[in-house]
Amino acid sequence: MEEVNPMFEGQPQQELDALMKSDPEFRQLYHRHRELDKKVLDAELGVLPLDDTSLARMKKEKLNAKDRLTRMFDQRRH
């Protein structure tokens, strides 16, 4: 399995792997979050030309994805 996103740092890798394998929605959202994270970073570094409105929208989507992923992970553990 690929490396763990820092938002799940300190969590058992085995639980993350199981969730990635068993839950297509979690897996898709996880990959979307990673894609947004890279694009936001590229935009902030000036590598990806993006206007402020688009960047703000992307950051909001990334945060929403992170919140949803965290909730899904916590629900799975309880």
Image (tube, helix red, strand yellow):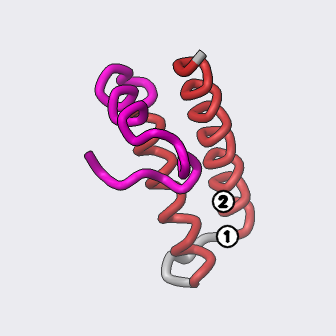
- Disc 1 crowd, CA 10 A, few/some/many (<14, 14-19, 20+): few
Residue corresponding to mark 2? 54
Lateral position of residue 24 relative to residue 65, left or right: left
Query: In this orientation, which residue lies closer to the viewer: 48 or 4?
Result: 4
Question: Residue pushed farthest bottom?
Answer: 46
Taking the spot 36% from the left edge, 35% from the top edge, the residue there is: 14
Query: In this orientation, which residue lies closer to the viewer: 78 or 4?
Result: 78
Q: Amino acid at mark 2?
A: Ser
Asked if residue 22 is among those painted magenta in the image, a careful observer would answer yes
Circles 2 and 1, Cβ within 8 Å, touching? The answer is yes
- Quadrant for the N terminus in the image: top left
Relative image position of residue 70 (x, y in whole percent): 62, 34
Q: CA distance from mark 2 to mark 1?
A: 5 Å
Lateral position of residue 56 relative to residue 72, left or right: right
- Quadrant for the C terminus in the image: top right
Taking the spot 53% from the left edge, 59% from the top edge, the residue there is: 37
Q: Amino acid at mark 1?
A: Asp
Q: Is residue 36 above or below residue 49?
A: above
Residue 28, labelled with which disc? none
SS state under label 2: helix
Q: Is residue 16 above or below residue 58?
A: above
Relative image position of residue 44 (x, y in whole percent): 62, 77
Taking the spot 55% from the left edge, 21% from the top edge, the residue there is: 77
- Disc 2 crowd, CA 10 A, few/some/many (<14, 14-19, 20+): few
Asked if residue 16 is among those painted magenta in the image, a careful observer would answer yes
Taking the spot 64% from the left edge, 45% from the top edge, the residue there is: 61
SS state under label 1: loop
Relative image position of residue 56 (x, y in whole percent): 73, 58
Q: Which residues are magenta?
A: 1-26
Residue corresponding to mark 1? 51
Q: Is residue 50 above or below residue 35?
A: below
Relative image position of residue 47 (x, y in whole percent): 49, 82
